């Protein structure tokens, strides 16, 4: 602490991201990155962009990428917002759309950045417990609120909420913004973007960090009614006019154009996930049904923190959360078949 700090900084509780180890040899299954590289077409587009033009600022509206996203989802350019990772997009959403008199609602077990944004922007929230099966029950959200946000599939559980249940929440809270954080939707869910023209209170966020394997590029997006997007543009243009650099704009646009590579790599991750689930179940793990590129699993006879430590000793890192309700679970990212096998081997004969 220092006397130079603005007073509110003293009480900030920042988000702690999963470890990015410096040792290259570790099998890294802790931050839900994609084990396959980005689309070769995205890499080629960025290489072409590595030229003298880097002396110039990028397009502040990232129109090339906005149009690529709009084409991909069949929406208009003014229904798309872009940011430096979906974390930045979410920050602007919390700031611009979720700060109201009534508390914001989100699941008790969900993305641990949500309460951090609430702390940053002074937003009161109500953590709504998942049911006994760790599922979101839409009826629990049908109460006065200043907004609703949840990941779908949820993180860190991986569990998917069906689109008709999402619609039920939209109908029950027509006067609040409902944000569906679809960071992992491409690994087994159906996007709610198809609903944005019918529900002016729906905002869907996505990221290129997972299914498009560009976590290092930092690109995220939101799709919704132009009025919602305008609030986000106002915040963005009062904060940083150029959140996406020249490489990010062309690389992300090319990634959206390369549907073949995207389909192939998503399919590989899904196939591997089903195999890892079966292997873990054979070792006695209970695995929650996952529609994401990670699984959430617990073993009835082995302490999760102990298992995580044992795996780490053998060079495999997974994510363990200390939060009480989920302290006996491990969140394990799906890797390449070789990485997944290293996980299974390291667990040994439980
Ligand atoms: C549910 C959820 N939302 C958003 C994000 C942020 O992703 P990014 O900032 O890389 O787009 C993550 C990252 O892990 C996530 O798990």
Image (cartoon, rainbow, N blue to C red):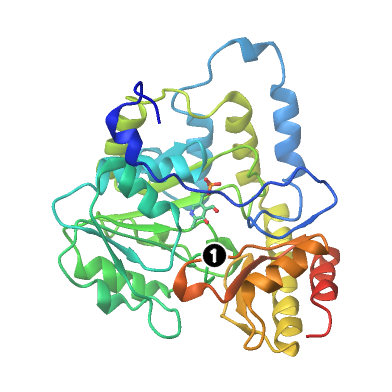
User: Considering the image in quadrants, where does the C terminus appear?
Assistant: bottom right
**With respect to residue 241, does 266 lie above or below?**
below
| The one of 15 and 291 positioned closer to us in this rendering | 15
Q: Residue at x 48, y 28 (%)?
A: 243
**With respect to residue 282, does 336 lie above or below?**
above
Residue 13 falls left or right of residue 84: left
User: Considering the image in quadrants, where does the N terminus appear?
Assistant: top left
| The one of 72 and 142 positioned closer to us in this rendering | 142
Place of residue 244 in the rendered image (x, y in percent of width and height, measured from the top left): 52, 29
Place of residue 330 in the rendered image (x, y in percent of width and height, measured from the top left): 62, 71
Whether residue 204 is visible here, answered yes or no, is no
Residue 346 falls left or right of residue 54: right
**With respect to residue 257, does 211 lie above or below?**
below
Instruction: Kindly state the secondary structure of the residue where label 1 is placed.
Output: loop
Q: Residue at x 47, y 24 (%)?
A: 242
| The one of 195 and 110 positioned closer to us in this rendering | 110
Whether residue 95 is visible here, answered yes or no, is yes
Residue linked to disc 1: 321
Place of residue 316 in the rendered image (x, y in percent of width and height, measured from the top left): 78, 62
Place of residue 195 in the rendered image (x, y in percent of width and height, measured from the top left): 35, 61
């Amino acid at each position: 602490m220092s006397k130079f700090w603005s007073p509110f900084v003293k009480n900030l509780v920042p988000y702690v991201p999963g470890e990015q180890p410096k040792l290259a040899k570790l099998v890294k299954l802790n931050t839900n990155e994609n084990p396959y590289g980005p689309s070769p077409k995205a890499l080629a587009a960025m290489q072409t962009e590595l030229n003298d033009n880097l002396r110039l600022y990028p397009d502040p509206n990232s129109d090339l990428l906005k149009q690529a996203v709009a084409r991909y989802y069949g929406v208009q350019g003014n229904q798309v917002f872009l940011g430096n990772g979906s974390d930045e997009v979410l920050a602007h959403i919390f700031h611009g759309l979720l700060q109201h008199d009534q508390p914001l609602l989100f699941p008790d077990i969900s993305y641990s950045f949500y309460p951090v944004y609430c702390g940053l922007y002074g937003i009161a929230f109500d953590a709504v417990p998942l049911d006994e099966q760790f599922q979101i029950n839409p009826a629990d959200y049908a109460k006065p609120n200043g907004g609703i946000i949840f990941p779908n599939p949820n993180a860190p559980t991986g569990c998917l909420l069906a689109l008709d249940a999402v619609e039920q929440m939209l109908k029950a809270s027509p006067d609040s913004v409902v944000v569906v954080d679809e960071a992992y939707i491409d690994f087994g869910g159906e996007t709610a973007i198809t609903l944005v023209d019918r529900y002016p209170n729906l905002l869907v966020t996505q990221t290129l960090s997972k299914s498009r394997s560009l976590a290092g590029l930092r690109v995220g997006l939101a799709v919704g009614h132009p009025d919602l997007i305008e609030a986000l543009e106002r915040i963005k243009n009062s904060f940083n006019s150029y959140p996406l650099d020249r490489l990010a704009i062309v690389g992300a646009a090319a990634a959206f154009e390369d549907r073949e590579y995207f389909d192939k790599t998503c399919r590989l991750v899904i196939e591997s996930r089903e195999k890892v689930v079966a292997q873990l179940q054979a070792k006695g793990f209970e695995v929650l049904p996952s529609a994401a590129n990670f699984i959430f699993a617990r073993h009835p006879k082995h302490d999760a923190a102990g298992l995580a430590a044992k795996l780490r000793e053998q060079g495999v890192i997974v994510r363990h959360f200390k939060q009480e309700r989920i302290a006996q679970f491990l969140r394990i990212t799906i890797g390449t078949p070789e990485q997944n096998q290293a996980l299974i081997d390291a667990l040994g004969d439980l």
